[in-house]
C-alpha cells in the first residue's frame, strides 16, 4: 500500500511539474519579440533549442522532439520539446515530452514498438568526481504519442565498453528481429568513434562493434551518429567535434558529414568506401537526424552551431530547425532536396521573369526564389534587410566553379558541378537563408538577421531568370 501511495504521489508531482511548465511557456510566449520569429521553421516556443531528437512517424503523424531549455535563451538542463506534423511542413506543438530530474535528457531517437512510441536517449548526470559527468542510456514509453513515462529499469545501457563517460546520442532502428543502436563516444586517447549494439527487446543490449573511428584528424568526439541504408550503400552520418579547418572545409565550430560504405549484418563490419564529406556547407548546421517513411529518407538538423552568437536571444528564444530535406545518393555523394510538400507554402508569386543587373525584388519576411543564370559568367545576388542588416552575398565564380555564401565577410564556399538542373533554390525566412544548388549537390544553411523585410538585388553582370514566391506561415 505504501509503495503504491509513493508511486501515485511521485507520479502526480511529475504531473504538476509538467502542468507548471506548460503554464510558464504560455505566459512567456506573450513576451517574445516577433521580429526574427521564423514563419516556417520549427523553433522553441520560448527559451533555447539545439539538436533534433526522436524524429519518427507514429499513428499517422511525424514526431519531432528537440533539446529544449525553456527558462532562458541559452543552453541549460535539457528537456525534450515536442512538435507533430502530417506532412513535414505544417507543425503544431505538443506538451514538453521529457523533463529533467536529477539528470538531464540529452539527445536520442524514437522507434515504434508494439504500438508504443519508445524514446531512447542519453541521461547526462553531473557527478562530483572527474570528469564531473556520466552518460548512460534511458528509455521512455508512450501509448498516445503525447505523454511519456520514463522506464523504471533505466539505465538500459549503463556504460561504454571502455568506460568512457562520453557515451551519448543513441539512434535506434530495426532490422529483421533485432533492434540496433549506434552511439557516439571516444577512445581512451580521445578519438571520436561510433559504437554499435543489438537487442531483441530494447532493454538488454549486446555490444557488437566499433563501426567508425577517428584516426585523429577526424576529431576527438563524434556526436549524434546515424546509420542507414541509402540506394544500396550504408551511410554513417555524424557530427565530429574537433576537426581542423582545411581550406574551404570544416569552417564551423564543429562539423556534420558522412562516410559512404558497405555494411554486412553477419560480419557487423562497416567498410568505408568514400571518406568523410560535409553534408551542408552553411554557417549554422549541426547534429542531424534522419528517419525513413514511404521509402524516403528524410533529414532534419539543428539550424545552429555551438559557441556562436544568437541575436534573437534577447527576444526570448534561440535556435531553430532547418527545413526538412529528402536524401538521395548519386555516385559518391548525398544529394539533399527540400521535401516536396515545401511547395505547399507558396502563397503569392512576387516575381516571375527577367531580373536585370541592379533590379531589386522586395519581399516580405519570407520568400522562395528560383534563380537561373548563365554559369559561364559571374552571378552575384545581394540579399539584405529593407532597413539594412542581415547582409548576405550569394556568388558564383565561373573561374573556380565555386558557389560562395558570404555573410558579412564570413565566407563559406564550395565547388559545384551541376548534375542536371542549374537552378538555385533559395529559402528566406525572417532570420534564415537556405540555398539548394541544382539537384541538391551543394546546400548551405545560414542564419541571417535583417532589419525589416527582405530585399534581393541582382549585382551580376548578367540578367537572371527569377521566380519568387511569398511563403505562408506553417508553424505557431
Ligand atoms: C550535440 C550535443 C549532443 C548532446 C546534446 C546536449 O549538439 O552536444 O551530443 O546529446 O547536444 O544538448
Image (cartoon, rainbow, N blue to C red):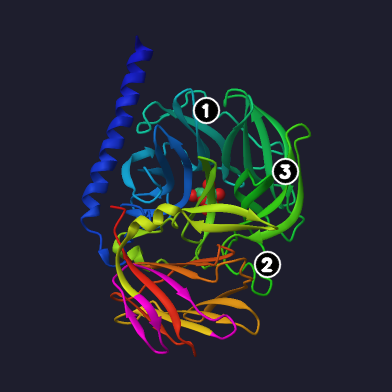
Q: Earlier in the sequence, mark 3 or mark 2?
A: 3
Residue at (61% x, 47% y) in the render = 131
Q: Nearer the viewer, residue 320 or 434?
A: 434
Q: CA distance from mark 3 to mark 2?
A: 22 Å
Question: Horizontal and vertical percent for residue 223?
Answer: 60, 50
Which residue: 66% across, 48% down? 235
Residue 432 vs residue 328, the one in the foreground = 328
| Residues in magenta, as a range | 352-378
Query: Which one is earlier in the sequence, the residue at label 1 or at label 3?
Result: 1
The answer to whether one can see residue 343 in this image is: yes
Residue 2 left/right relative to 119: left
Q: Is 462 above or below relative to 258?
A: below
CB of mark 2 within 8 Å of CB of mark 1? no
Residue 382: percent from the left, percent from the top? 43, 82
Question: Residue at point 55% right, 71% down?
Answer: 422
Label 1: which residue? 154
Q: CA distance from mark 1 to mark 3?
A: 25 Å
Q: Nearer the viewer, mark 1 or mark 3?
A: 3
Q: Look at the image and say whether residue 215 sits in the magenta stretch.
A: no
Disc nearer the start of the sequence (2/1): 1
Which is more foreground, mark 2 or mark 1? Answer: 2
Name the outermost residue toward the top. 1
Q: Are marks 3 and 2 in contact (CB under 8 Å)?
A: no
**Circle nearer the viewer, 3 or 2:** 3
Callout 3 secondary element: strand
Q: Give how far apart the Cα atoms at labels 2 and 1 are.
A: 37 Å
**Circle 2 is placed at which residue position?**
244
Residues under numbered marks 1 and 3 in contact, where contact means CB atoms less than 8 Å apart: no
Q: Name the residue that disc number 3 marks.
A: 211
Residue nearest the observer in this picture, 356 or 93: 356
Amino acid at each position: 500500500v505504501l509503495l503504491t501511495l509513493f508511486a501515485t504521489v511521485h507520479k502526480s508531482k511529475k504531473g504538476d511539474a509538467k502542468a507548471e511548465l506548460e503554464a510558464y511557456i504560455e505566459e512567456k510566449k506573450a513576451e517574445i519579440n516577433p521580429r526574427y520569429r521564423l514563419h516556417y521553421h520549427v523553433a522553441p516556443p520560448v527559451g533555447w533549442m539545439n539538436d533534433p531528437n526522436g524524429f519518427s512517424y507514429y499513428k499517422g503523424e511525424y514526431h519531432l522532439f528537440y533539446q529544449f531549455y525553456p527558462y532562458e535563451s541559452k543552453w541549460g538542463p535539457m528537456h525534450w520539446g515536442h512538435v507533430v506534423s502530417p506532412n513535414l511542413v505544417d507543425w503544431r506543438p505538443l506538451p514538453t515530452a521529457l523533463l529533467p530530474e536529477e539528470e538531464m535528457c540529452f539527445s536520442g531517437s524514437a522507434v515504434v514498438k508494439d504500438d508504443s512510441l519508445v524514446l531512447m536517449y542519453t541521461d547526462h548526470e553531473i557527478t562530483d568526481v572527474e570528469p564531473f559527468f556520466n552518460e548512460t542510456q534511458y528509455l521512455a514509453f508512450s501509448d498516445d504519442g503525447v505523454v511519456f513515462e520514463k522506464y523504471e529499469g533505466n539505465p538500459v545501457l549503463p556504460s561504454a565498453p571502455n568506460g568512457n563517460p562520453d557515451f551519448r546520442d543513441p539512434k535506434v532502428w530495426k532490422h529483421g528481429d533485432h533492434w540496433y543502436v549506434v552511439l557516439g563516444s571516444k577512445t581512451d586517447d580521445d578519438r571520436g568513434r561510433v559504437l554499435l549494439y543489438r537487442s531483441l527487446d530494447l532493454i538488454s543490449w549486446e555490444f557488437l562493434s566499433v563501426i567508425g573511428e577517428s584516426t585523429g584528424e577526424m576529431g576527438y568526439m563524434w556526436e549524434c551518429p546515424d546509420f542507414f541504408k541509402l540506394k544500396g550503400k550504408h551511410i554513417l552520418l555524424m557530427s565530429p567535434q574537433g576537426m581542423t579547418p582545411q581550406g574551404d572545409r570544416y569552417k564551423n565550430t564543429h562539423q556534420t558529414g558522412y562516410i559512404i560504405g558497405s555494411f554486412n549484418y553477419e560480419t557487423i563490419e562497416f567498410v568505408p568506401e568514400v571518406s568523410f564529406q560535409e553534408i551542408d556547407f552553411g554557417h549554422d548546421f549541426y547534429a542531424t537526424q534522419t528517419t525513413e517513411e514511404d521509402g524516403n529518407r528524410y533529414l532534419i538538423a539543428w539550424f545552429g552551431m555551438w559557441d556562436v552568437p544568437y541575436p534573437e536571444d534577447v527576444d526570448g528564444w534561440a535556435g531553430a530547425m532547418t527545413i526538412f530535406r529528402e536524401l538521395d545518393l548519386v555516385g559518391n555523394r548525398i544529394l539533399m532536396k527540400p521535401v516536396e510538400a515545401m511547395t505547399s507554402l507558396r502563397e503569392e508569386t512576387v516575381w516571375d521573369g527577367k531580373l536585370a543587373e541592379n533590379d531589386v525584388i522586395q519581399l516580405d519576411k519570407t520568400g522562395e526564389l528560383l534563380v537561373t543564370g548563365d554559369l559561364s559568367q559571374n552571378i552575384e545576388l545581394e540579399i539584405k534587410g529593407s532597413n539594412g542588416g542581415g547582409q548576405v552575398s550569394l556568388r558564383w565564380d565561373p573561374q573556380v566553379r565555386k558557389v560562395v555564401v558570404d555573410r558579412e565577410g564570413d565566407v563559406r564556399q564550395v565547388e559545384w558541378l551541376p548534375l542536371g538542373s542549374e537552378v538555385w533554390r533559395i529559402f528566406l525566412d525572417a532570420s534564415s537563408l537556405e540555398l539548394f544548388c541544382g539537384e541538391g549537390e551543394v546546400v548551405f544553411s545560414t542564419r541571417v538577421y535583417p532589419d525589416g523585410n527582405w530585399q534581393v538585388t541582382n549585382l551580376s553582370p548578367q540578367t537572371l531568370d527569377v521566380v519568387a514566391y511569398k511563403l505562408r506561415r506553417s508553424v505557431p
